[in-house]
Amino acid sequence: MASPPPRIVHSENVSGLINTMMSRHQLRPSDIKKERRAFVVHGRGEFCCNFCPNSWESFYSWIQVDLKDQRIVYRWKMKCKLCYLNPRHIGVEPTFDVEETEKMIEKAIYS
Ligand SMILES: [Zn+2]
């Protein structure tokens, strides 16, 4: 199988992005309640295996966003389908492009 051309993943300035999007919705970190600050959302994430050249994407890449701290607090790892038998391969975390990150932040804001 021919590998697709590498896609450019923009570096994520997640805190800045969350800040911008929250102010667009007139939301400040102080408006977010302590006990209701973290939201689990998913989007199209990109994965690069750390053991082989394999890379893939998944529309079900899950993250947890904290709207009070304005950061991604957790990214669920996914295992490479070629390396999952390797006990040293514990999976890799997804990265997202800016557009996708914005969509997920919106989901968190509206949930
Ligand atoms: Zn791999």
Image: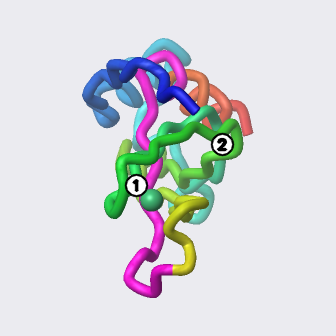
In the rendered image, the vertical position of residue 83 relative to residue 61, given as above or below:
below
Q: Circle 1 sits in a helix, a strand or a loop, which is it?
A: loop
Q: How many circles with numbers are drawn on the protein?
A: 2
The residue sitting at 40% across, 55% down in the picture is: 49
The residue sitting at 64% across, 53% down in the picture is: 40
Q: Which of these two is toward me, 74 or 48?
A: 48
The residue sitting at 67% across, 32% down in the picture is: 107
Quadrant of image for the N terminus: top right
- The x and y percentages for residue 67 are 47, 44
In the rendered image, the vertical position of residue 47 relative to residue 22, given as above or below:
below
Q: Which mark is residue 84?
A: none
Disc 1 to disc 2: CB gap under 8 Å: no
| Horizontal side, residue 50 vs residue 80: left or right | left
Q: Circle 2 sits in a helix, a strand or a loop, which is it?
A: strand
Q: What is the CA distance from the residue labelled 1 to the residue labelled 2?
A: 20 Å
In the rendered image, the vertical position of residue 10 relative to residue 104, given as above or below:
above
Task: Tell whether circle 1 marks a residue whose Cβ is less than 8 angstroms from ligand 1.
Answer: yes
Q: Earlier in the sequence, mark 1 or mark 2?
A: 2
| Ligand 1 positioned in quadrant | bottom left
Quadrant of image for the C terminus: top right
- The x and y percentages for residue 3 are 48, 29
| Horizontal side, residue 23 vs residue 37: left or right | left
Dividing the picture into quadrants, the one containing residue 58 is: top right
Give, as a single range, the part of the protein colored magenta: 86-101
Q: Which of these two is toward me, 104 or 18?
A: 104
Q: Which of these two is toward me, 93 or 30?
A: 93
Amino acid type of the residue tagged 2 in the rendering: His
Q: Which residue is mark 1?
A: 49
Amino acid type of the residue tagged 1 in the rendering: Cys
Task: Tell whether circle 2 marks a residue whose Cβ is less than 8 angstroms from ligand 1.
Answer: no
Q: Does the stretch in magenta take in 81?
A: no
Q: Which residue is mark 2?
A: 42
